[in-house]
Amino acid sequence: MSINRRSLIQASGLGAVAAVAAPFAPSAVAKEPKNKNKHTLVNGADVAAADNWSVFAGRTIGVITNPTGVLSSFRTIVDDMASKGVDVGAVFGPEHGFRGTAQDGAAEETSVDPRTGITVYDTYGASVATYARFYEESGVDTIVFDIQDVGARFYTYIWTMWDAMQAASQSGRRFVVLDRANPIGGQARGPVLQDGFQSGVGKLGIALQHGMTVGELARYFNAVFLPKAGLEPIDLEVVEVQGWKREMTGPDNRATWILPSPNMPTPETATLYPGTALFEATNMSEGRGTTRPFELIGAPYVDYQWAEALNSKGLDGVTFREAYFNPTLSKNAGQICAGVQVHINDHESVEALEVGIHMLVEAKRLYPGFDWRGDGGRWMGLLSGSARAAEQIDAGADAQTIIGSWGRELGQFVRDTRPFLLYPGRR
């Protein structure tokens, strides 16, 4: 998911702490599917469905979802709800759309879903006022959020949720999150977004790799950021995932992986994304238009030296293979690019931000053709959260200096978010 190249949506303001609603406690536990995975997960949607969707009894709901909003049977939650008498008044489609037919920076137009007869509203890029208007037009009293996040601040579905929460506060709607595991784990990494760098790919001061589920983020947003925006906390419920621990990553999610967006094909993509997506801010291809986006990185001016330099660093969990590719779309489309494919050999030890920063530092050092996109590294600022990273790279700072520069703010973020966590494990 990338910056909307036509415009950047500016964020709401920040501000102080308030209480948060307790998570939903199901009266029935979803039956776990039979498999040999020792870490069987039961997502919030399956927990709610096993209880016959009673969390929505007597309510008219509006559902914010996409193709990842499915049960363990892979049936969409909207289709299942509609077939079982849940009063679904509307569906709100985010970037890429409800059924997932649109590319990055695009959405499906408002229409009537042919299977269910439910109106699907196009809310990609919608303002808070537009959300509130859609709530009123559709007659819904409860907003339901069920989308698979990938754990990076600049993956825009969490900002869809934030805007929808603000509209729920303004219009007095209830809000329910059907929670899903964070596929890259529950550890926070990277810099925290600073004032002046809010945009459609980062609206609030959270770490780049936030290490939270969407349900935990919703609790944090509700308690801290809604009051800072001058809004009342909402009536929030979180239907929790069962069987998830913060250490679970990558392969633990493989059996049920669904592309949350067209350029997020595998758990490996998600694992690397917080680091390699920073190449969105450069003139290098981040692999869009190939079968391995965010794993293949390169440009026409790169050569074999980049892979050699990166492998000499001995970074945990990854190996860099010299690679050549021809993107079919986006940057450098139709040109032979030299570069690397980042191969993960140990999911548990990969630190994507460390990988991405080392890659950027070495590309800048080796190639005079390397450059930032946008005005003086502004896009890098929007992705990383401040002007600091681009300035340090331009000044020739080494990767460990850059990584160490965000330690204090990251530590504060970890402390601030601890009260809102729902799941056990190392933070």
Image (cartoon, helix red, strand yellow):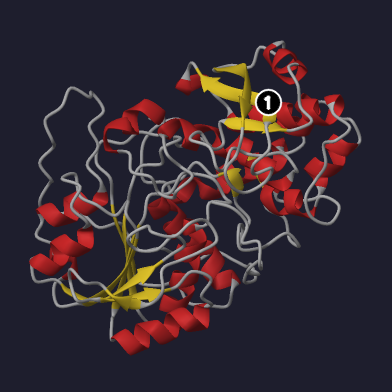
* Number of callouts: 1
Q: Quadrant of residue 201?
A: bottom right
Tell me residue 210's x, y (percent). Answer: 54, 44
Q: Quadrant of residue 378?
A: bottom right
Q: Is residue 222 visible?
A: no
Q: Is residue 391 left or right of residue 241?
A: right
Q: Quadrant of residue 88?
A: bottom left
Q: Is residue 406 left or right of residue 126?
A: right
Front residue of 329/13: it is 329
Say which residue appears at 58% left-offset and 24% top-offset: 342
Say which residue appears at 58% left-offset and 51% top-offset: 154
Q: Is residue 104 left or right of residue 77?
A: right
Say which residue appears at 64% left-offset and 27% top-offset: 355
Tell me residue 174's x, y (percent). Answer: 32, 74
Q: Is residue 98 left or right of residue 219?
A: left
Q: Is residue 193 above or below residue 408?
A: below
Q: Is residue 218 visible?
A: yes
Front residue of 141/300: it is 300
Tell me residue 158's x, y (percent). Answer: 48, 57
- Residue linked to disc 1: 339
Outermost residue to the front: 334
Q: Amino acid at mark 1?
A: Gly
Outermost residue to the bottom: 137
